[in-house]
Amino acid sequence: MTDRCVALMRGWCAGIASVVLASVASAGPAHAGGWEEFIKRCVVPMEVGLEPKVIGLDLKEGDPVGQAFDLPGPSHIIIRPPFQMLGTQCQVVTQPVETAKASFDKWLASVLEAGRYTPDPDIESRWLTSEDVLEDLALDGWQECDQMVFQLSILESQS
């Protein structure tokens, strides 16, 4: 099977996963948390080389670093264009810290165990995608005051 064929199959599988995630999210509470929206709108598409999904979100005015979109609840997503050695970046700023961190920790444990991400040996709060993921990505997470920030960045493009 050619690399292109494998990439197309991964894209198709990610599309199916997006539909399933959207169905699960819509069956849950009134709105998903910022971390869950980040997974659905940024992580799933970016892992297979697609752009972050912002359809249905309201664009916030005046963000100097990219396009910011409001999410339900006290969260927003920021999409940044490629800069220096990084490709597109997708960042979510979310509250409350405890809920976002618990959701992140649970997700991270599962993807580390599955081998999809590995800890970055040089940066403590960064995880890198493994060969099991189509796109080379770096995931960072940190706390700023009373909110959590998670950022997914495409590493230097290989195309």
Image (cartoon, rainbow, N blue to C red):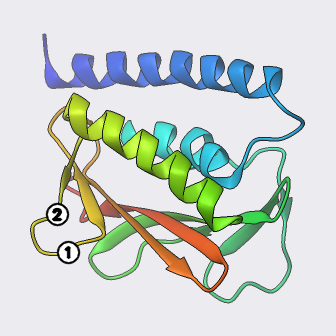
- The residue beneath circle 1 is 123
Residue 100 lies in quadrant: bottom right
Instruction: Assign the N terminus to one quadrant of the image.
Output: top left
> Which residue type carries mark 1?
Ile
Which residue is at a point 20% across and 75% down the rendered structure image?
A: 123
- The residue beneath circle 2 is 120
Secondary structure beneath dot 2 equals loop
Image position, residue 51 (x, y; %): 53, 48
Assess whether mark 2 and mark 1 are in contact (beta carbons under 8 angstroms): yes
- Is residue 49 in view? no
Nearer to us in this view, 95 or 11: 95
Which residue is at a point 64% across and 45% down the rendered structure image?
A: 53
Residue 2, compared with residue 151, is above or below; it is: above
Image position, residue 156 (x, y; %): 24, 65
Which residue is at a point 28% across and 25% down the rendered structure image?
A: 7
- Describe residue 108's horizontal placement relative to residue 61 as left or right: left
Total tally of numbered discs in the picture: 2
Nearer to us in this view, 86 or 4: 86
Secondary structure beneath dot 1 equals loop
